[in-house]
Image: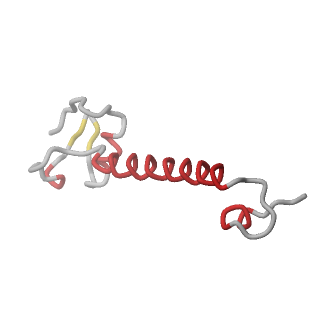
């Protein structure tokens, strides 16, 4: 017997899931969604430079010559959060 997902979620037609089990599955999905958004927004500041440092004025990061300000993110990608980097 083929079970359609929409029937399970919205309770139309035959369903092998009871109301309590349906809520458990929906709550689990909601928890995964919340953790995903939390991790996404937590990671927006990495890698980065301290505030007040102009990216256009940087010419070297960790012995890598910077020709374009977009290369700074590439140069800092190998650093762990909180780890220091030499910037000239």
Q: Residue at x 25, y 45 (%)?
A: 48
Depth check, front residue: 6 or 13: 13
Name the residue: 19% across, 32% down.
Answer: 86
Residue extending furthest toward the front: 19
**Percent coordinates x, y for residue 37 in the rendering:** 41, 53
**Image spot of residue 62 (x, y percent):** 25, 33
Determine the residue located farthest toward the right in the rendered image: 1
| 32 horizontally vs 50: left or right | right
Residue at horizontal 35%, vertical 40%? 77
Q: Residue furthest top?
A: 83
- The residue closer to the viewer here, 52 or 62, is 52
Residue 2: x and y in percent read 87, 60
Which of the colour schemes (rainbow, by chain, secondary structure, one colour) is used? secondary structure
- For image coordinates 78% across by 54% down, the residue present is 16
Task: Specify the quadrant that holds the C terminus.
Answer: top left
Q: Is residue 68 left or right of residue 78?
A: left
The reply, left or right, for residue 70 in relation to residue 8 is left
Which is more toward the observer, 51 or 38?
38
Q: Quadrant of the N terminus?
A: bottom right
């Amino acid at each position: 017997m083929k079970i359609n997902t929409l029937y399970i979620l919205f309770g139309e037609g035959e369903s092998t899931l009871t109301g309590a089990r349906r809520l458990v599955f929906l709550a689990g999905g909601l928890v995964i969604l919340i953790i995903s958004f939390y991790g996404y927004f937590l990671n927006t500041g990495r890698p980065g430079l301290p505030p007040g440092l102009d990216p256009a004025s940087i010419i070297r990061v960790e012995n890598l010559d910077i020709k374009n300000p977009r290369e700074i993110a590439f140069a800092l990608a190998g650093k762990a959060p909180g780890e220091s980097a030499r910037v000239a």
